[in-house]
Image (cartoon, rainbow, N blue to C red):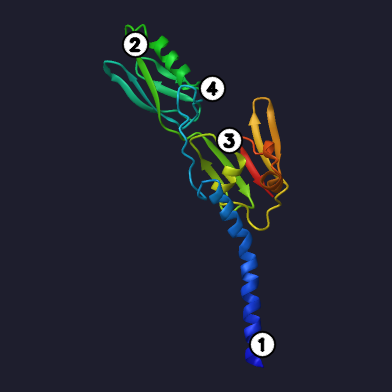
Amino acid sequence: MLDNWKRWHLVVGVWILALMAFPVCGRAAEAMNTGISPGSEVTMNVTGDDYLLGPGDVLSISVWKNADLTKTVQISPDGMIYFPLLGQIMTDEMTVAQLTQTLQEKIAPFVPDPQISVEVQQVNSLAVYVIGRVIHSGRFVFNGNINVLQALAMAGGLNPFAKRSEIKIIRTEKEGVKVYPFDYNAVTEDNALAQNIQLKRGDTIVVP
């Protein structure tokens, strides 16, 4: 009789552990469905001429037939780079194409008919923050377009205690702070895809 009692408790315990683990497994499956491993970095190439430069990005700048003016520079936290002959150059709100044009105009008095190439060697400024009830909260760097579901997948998915219908995306812009609601179940089960917005540099996802 005692052995049967112990066996019953063992079975119940296993079922409880399985039920507790199921939501976490579900989040892992959701992450797999996005094609992104939890905690990974999204690596889509968006560093062409229309890429908007940001602090921390590493640039390779070369002037054709002028090895002395071929440099690798990193954009400082205040948006500046240093380039020979020109000194400090502000890159804030500039695309790769705009910076290339600016450098060509500024260096023309020193180098006749300059042919300048600007390439982004390393993207460090594209990052979003995921905080709250996720498996791995923190700062996540990405190299391409990313939406809310993909960012949550990078964070390992929601933990079992997350309030799935009360997620918010906080975005700071020049006009002020904007808050976008995100209902996880509505997006994943009811096709409310308008809430699955494309994220921008510096967005914060809050999972209560």
Q: Is residue 155 visible?
A: no
Residue at coordinates 69% horizontally, 28% vertically from top-left? 176
Residue indicated by mark 4? 93
Q: Residues within 10 Å of mark 1 (few under 14, many from 20)?
A: few
Q: Residues within 10 Å of mark 3 (few under 14, many from 20)?
A: some
Q: Is residue 206 above or below residue 85?
A: below
Which amino acid does the dot numbered 2 rest on? Pro
The disc, 2 or 1, on the residue closer to the chain's N-terminal end is 1
Distance between the Cα atoms at labels 1 and 3?
Answer: 56 Å
Residue indicated by mark 2? 114
The disc, 2 or 4, on the residue closer to the chain's N-terminal end is 4
Distance between the Cα atoms at labels 2 and 3?
Answer: 35 Å
* Residue 202, numbered label: 3
Which amino acid does the dot numbered 1 rest on? Trp
Distance between the Cα atoms at labels 1 and 4?
Answer: 70 Å
Report if the CB atoms under discs 2 and 4 are less than 8 Å apart: no
